[in-house]
Image (spheres, rainbow, N blue to C red):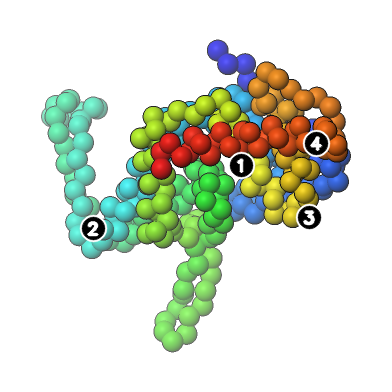
Amino acid sequence: MIAMIDINPSDIKDLMESYGLTDFEIPDQFTPNLKASKRLASLLWYANNGYGFDFSISTRLKEIPLLIQFLRTCEGSTLEIKGTITKPKGKQVKGTELTATISNQQFLTWLELFANTWFESRQDGLFQYEFGWEFKQPLTLRKGLAPVYEEEQDPFFTDPYSDEELSQIIDYYDKLEKSHLKYSKNGKLGRLANRIVSLMKPVCIDWKATKLYSFVYDIMLLGKCTGKECITEEGFSGDIGREKSQQVRNWLQAYNRDIGKVT
């Protein structure tokens, strides 16, 4: 059984301040006022407790973009749903096939928007870090009659994924499945380091690589995500900074090699 390790965001905030960095908000419509320290704590928790690299659940999410593609491809037609009876009602027989049809196009449009919104909330920023995408914003609706329209943001739905984005997402999952989801130990650390670098770069544009990678190392050390050998000295100057920076580079290189196996 894995011993769950909780990461205190306040510890991360203290580390950020030691590097001269003020905690900042991350734009995310699903978690208003989300602070970087909390986001980093979440990344460390998932990675340290094994969830960050168990893709068996993540790859099942591919069903949702496939559903969205299906709904778009079959737009305007009547859909048939087929399943096996597991909880029979009345004279139904358990284990037999049951079908239902849906022809209500308004509902099918709603279903597609719901699938987009649900998927965006469930993928937990994965594609923002993997592809550098922005978070989806609330869907903008046009109200009124032409030629006069008023725009307002939908309180529930987000902007849908484009066809190109869906294809890229499905291809991403296909490659994970093809690789049997095997990462080396350093590749796993490199994947986490890559996400932290992507998160911090926009606010660390004036930092040299040695300082940025040293910060990434210290964040991972705080979350017990550096492997058995640890560099415990504080700071990012001189030999200490170079050693931390080189270790992060090694992890990133291992991650990129692992990714290359499935391209």
Residue annotated with mark 4:
241
User: Residue 210's x, y, as percent?
Assistant: 76, 42
| Image-quadrant location for residue 238 | top right
**Tag 2–tag 1 contact (CB < 8 Å):** no
Q: Tag 2's secondary structure?
A: loop
> Which residue is situated farthest in the bottom direction here?
147
User: Is any part of residue 235 visible from this angle?
Assistant: yes
Tell me the tag on residue 195. Answer: 1
Are there few (<14), some (14-19), or many (20+) residues within 10 Å of tag 4? many
Amino acid type of disc 1?
A: Arg
Are there few (<14), some (14-19), or many (20+) residues within 10 Å of tag 3? few
- Dot in front, 2 or 1: 1
User: Residue 117's x, y, as percent?
Assistant: 46, 52
- Dot in front, 4 or 3: 4
User: Residue 37's x, y, as percent?
Assistant: 73, 40
**Quick one: quadrant of the N terminus?**
top right
Residue 136 to residue 173: above or below:
below
Amino acid type of disc 4?
A: Gly
Q: 25 or 88, which lies in front?
A: 25
Residue annotated with mark 3:
206
- Dot in front, 1 or 3: 3
- Dot in front, 3 or 2: 3
At 37% from the left and 47% from the top, the residue drawn is 170
User: How far is mark 2 from mark 1, CA to CA?
Assistant: 36 Å
At 21% from the left and 36% from the top, the residue drawn is 83
Tell me the tag on residue 74. Answer: 2
